[in-house]
Image: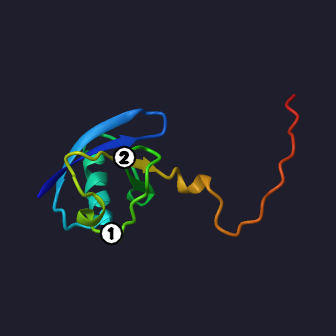
Amino acid sequence: METYPVAYVGHGSGQTRLLVPVSSTASVAEFIAGLSKRLTKIAIQVYEADLQLRIGEPNGPLLDGDDLLEHVVLTPRDEVLFATSRGQPSSQPPVGAAPTSVRSIDIL
């Protein structure tokens, strides 16, 4: 069992730092699932599918969900993981969606 320091960077909410114990043989996806539960316990509502895990900094390399932690986080106690949100899925158009035109509205 390893302990991984994680900083959650939410939209406009600053950073929340956590220590997450998990097996080094867990996948990144399993780690994200556990992190999502921990964030919910401290009243930070996140959608697990929106969470991304990066290493070193909020814009650092993106970790793939299929990778094992032991293969991508070589020194867990020395490296900080950053959990970021992809944003609200409804705010992004579906892949292949045609752009819509925008017109002004007169307010009386």
Give left or right: position of 93 versus 55: right
Q: How is the image coloured?
A: rainbow
* Residue at 30% in and 47% down: 40
Instruction: Kindly indicate the quadrant of the structure image that contains residue 104.
Output: top right
- Looking at the rendered structure, the kind of residue marked 2 is Gly
User: Camera-side residue: 49 or 1?
Assistant: 1
Which labelled disc corresponds to residue 84?
none
In this view, which residue lies farthest toward the top? Answer: 108
Q: Position of residue 4 (x, y in %)?
A: 22, 49
Q: Which secondary structure lies at badge 1?
A: loop
Q: CA distance from mark 2 to mark 1?
A: 17 Å
Residue depicted at 33% across the width and 69% down the height: 67
Q: Quadrant of the N terminus?
A: bottom left
Mark 2 or mark 1, which is nearer to you? 2
Question: What residue is rendered at 27% in x and 68% in y?
Answer: 68
- Name the foreground residue: 33 vs 63: 63
Q: Nearer the viewer, residue 96 or 45?
A: 96
Mark sitting earlier along the chain (2/1):
2
Q: Is residue 100 above or below residue 95?
A: above
Please determine whether, in this image, residue 65 is positioned above or below residue 44. Answer: below
Mark 1 neighbour density, 10 Å: few (under 14) some (14–19) many (20 or more): some
Residue indicated by mark 1? 67
Residue 31 spot, x, y in % from top left? 27, 59
Give the SS element for disc 2.
loop
State which quarter of the image contains the C terminus: top right
Mark 2 lies on residue: 56
